[in-house]
């Protein structure tokens, strides 16, 4: 059973009755799930005004109070994980176990922020004159506008909400219209955990209109966006024009370096699993595979076996490991990249086609031996597609890995410590994983460099972009 959908302004939940809105559909079947209410320009102004009023009080709330609310929210999230996960599977398509795991991981983020928000310290700087006291304090930045994506509809939104709430900010959040149930559930959780009205407001509507309205408002002091690089750049330019702070979690095109001294079979199995997680619709998805020539055939063969063994289907069905793509735009975009790669001489090892007529299923796909100029090697596929090419030496592999403007995640498989250390230093990426996958825990900063973004979510850095520095000197 799907959940009713709401906007939330100043603590009031607004349904789609007597409002414009849009249909929400199951990407696996096309079945209508519900109707999402759109907020009007007047609603957006009401949300901004509510956030401003709430901020005036919330900024002075005690960290103990903020921590307690975040902890209660974590408990409620765990209690409701199964129900929230089921709705995510329906509107996002991912397998139920993955959806529930995403929600539980969200509870861990709430716990982390509940702990860390009690440690938002300033410092005392020794003065040149003993009669002077010099303080550095950190204060909440103000009202934040946030935009969270559909690929981890609970997990991506909770990072922004937990950081804003913990820092003492208020927020107007537009969730993903493709997969909105998780953000509605999150609003309920924060409300039931005792968050005062107006601290978190949820709005919906045409993305470009909502973002323009919010970012241009003088009430908004900070922007947080997770999504594609082109949209991120547009929003960053708008925020820059109004001198607003921002954090950006954008796309990547994660390189994987498999050296001949790696455990090739173990790497192939682990990478196949990661590649197809969320049907490849993950900003950290391994997507450009550079494999040392002497183990290239062995890797391609084992990786293909592992990819072909993955069960694709409706996320609520038993044993399904990969669901559909989110919408038909993604289906077409992914297929165009594969056709271009094959047209440029790549070998279609497996997949390369839509599965069935209903829903947006695309077969797990491998293209091997394609030229570096193929679009699949330069544009983020954001789908269940892996491009595999051989390399000869370390410097060549690193140069090819670093050749794109992206810098989010990178993966290295090697048995040699020296190679691992050299690759960790040389790769231009915000997150480097060596011989395993270890990201997206609340205690670790998550973020990219180059075109992949600005700032980090999680880790002890998590509040940095929600706070401003104030220097006080007194005599
Ligand atoms: P898209 O760029 O059309 O939309 C992606 C998301 O951005 C949507 O949820 C949409 O609501 C939002 N968006 C689009 N224009 C906006 C605007 N002007 N203002 C505010 N929000 C806006 O792409 P898509 O096909 O839906 O998704 C695929 C692309 O999105 C991929 O290339 C990937 O890089 C990116 N993406 C990245 C992440 C991530 O975790 N970094 C998550 C989801 C999508």
Image (cartoon, grey):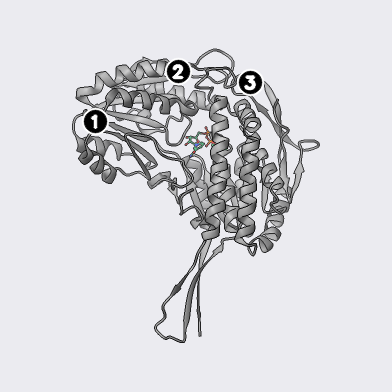
Label 2 vs label 3, nearer the camera: 2
The local secondary structure at tag 3 comes to loop
On the picture, is 265 further left or further right than 193? left
The Cα–Cα distance between marks 1 and 2, rounded to whole angstroms, is: 25 Å
Residue 303 x, y percent position in the rendering? 34, 20
Q: Residue visible at 30% across and 40% down?
A: 402
Q: At x 53% / y 38%, what residue is drawn?
A: 105
Residue 243 visible in the picture: no
Q: Quadrant of residue 424?
A: top left
Mark 2: give few (<14), some (14-19) or many (20+) Cα within 10 Å.
some
Q: Earlier in the sequence, mark 1 or mark 2?
A: 1
Q: Residue, x 51% and y 40% (percent of image)? A: 227
- Give the vertical position of 160 relative to 254 (above or below): below
From the viewer's perspective, tell me whether residue 258 is left or right of residue 61.
left
Query: Of helix, strand and loop, which one carries label 1?
Result: loop
Image coordinates of residue 390 in percent, x first then y, are: 24, 26
**Dot 2 or dot 3, earlier in sequence:** 3
Image coordinates of residue 371 in percent, x first then y, are 29, 26
Residue for badge 3: 30
- CA distance separating discs 2 and 3: 23 Å
Mark 1 is surrounded, within 10 Å at the Cα level, by few (under 14), some (14 to 19) or many (20 or more) other residues, namely: many
The image's mark for residue 225 is none
Residue at image position (19%, 30%) is 392
Return the residue at label 2: 310
Q: Which residue is mark 1?
A: 259
Q: Does 228 sit above or below residue 131?
A: above
């Amino acid at each position: 059973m799907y959940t009713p959908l709401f906007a939330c302004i100043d603590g009031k939940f607004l349904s789609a009755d007597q409002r414009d809105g849009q249909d929400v559909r199951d990407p696996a079947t096309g079945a209508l799930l519900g109707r999402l209410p759109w907020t009007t320009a007047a609603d957006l102004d009401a949300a901004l005004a509510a956030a401003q009023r709430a901020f005036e009080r919330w900024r002075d709330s005690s960290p103990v109070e903020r921590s307690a609310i975040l902890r209660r929210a974590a408990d409620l999230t765990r209690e409701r994980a199964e129900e929230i996960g089921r709705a995510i599977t329906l509107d996002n398509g991912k397998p139920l176990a993955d959806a529930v795991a995403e929600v539980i991981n969200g509870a861990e983020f709430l716990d982390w922020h509940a702990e860390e928000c009690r440690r938002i310290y300033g410092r005392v700087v020794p003065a040149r004159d003993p009669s002077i006291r010099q303080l550095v304090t950190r204060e909440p930045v103000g009202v934040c506008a946030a935009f969270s994506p559909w690929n981890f509809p609970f997990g991506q939104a909770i990072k922004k909400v937990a950081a804003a709430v913990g820092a003492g900010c208020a927020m107007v959040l537009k969730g993903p219209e493709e997969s909105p149930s998780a953000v509605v559930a999150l609003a309920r959780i924060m409300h039931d955990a005792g968050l005062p009205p107006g601290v978190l407001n949820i709005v919906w509507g045409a993305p470009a209109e909502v973002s323009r309205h919010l970012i241009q408002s003088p009430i908004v002091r900070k922007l947080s966006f997770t999504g594609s690089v082109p949209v991120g750049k547009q929003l960053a330019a708008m925020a820059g024009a109004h001198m607003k702070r921002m954090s950006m979690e954008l796309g990547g095109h994660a390189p994987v370096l498999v050296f001949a001294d790696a455990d090739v079979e173990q790497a192939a199995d682990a990478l196949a699993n990661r590649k197809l997680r969320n049907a490849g619709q993950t900003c950290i998805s391994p997507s450009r595979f550079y494999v040392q020539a002497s183990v290239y055939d062995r890797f391609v063969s084992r990786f293909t076996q592992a990819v072909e063994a993955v069960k694709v289907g409706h996320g609520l069905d038993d044993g399904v490991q990969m669901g559909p793509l989110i919408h038909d735009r993604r289906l077409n975009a992914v297929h165009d990249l594969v056709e271009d790669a094959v047209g440029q001489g790549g070998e279609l090892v497996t997949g390369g086609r839509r599965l069935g007529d209903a829903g947006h299923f695309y077969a797990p796909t491998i293209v091997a031996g394609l030229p570096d100029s193929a679009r699949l090697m330069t544009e983020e596929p954001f789908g269940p597609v892996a491009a595999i090419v051989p390399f000869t030496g370390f410097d060549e592999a690193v140069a090819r890995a670093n050749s794109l403007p992206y810098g989010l995640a990178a993966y290295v498989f090697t048995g040699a410590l020296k190679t691992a250390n050299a690759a960790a230093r040389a790769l231009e990426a915000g997150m480097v994983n060596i011989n395993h996958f270890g990201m997206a825990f609340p205690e670790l900063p998550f973020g990219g460099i180059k075109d992949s973004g600005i700032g980090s979510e999680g880790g002890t850095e998590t509040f940095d972009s929600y706070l401003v520095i104030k220097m006080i000197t007194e005599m």
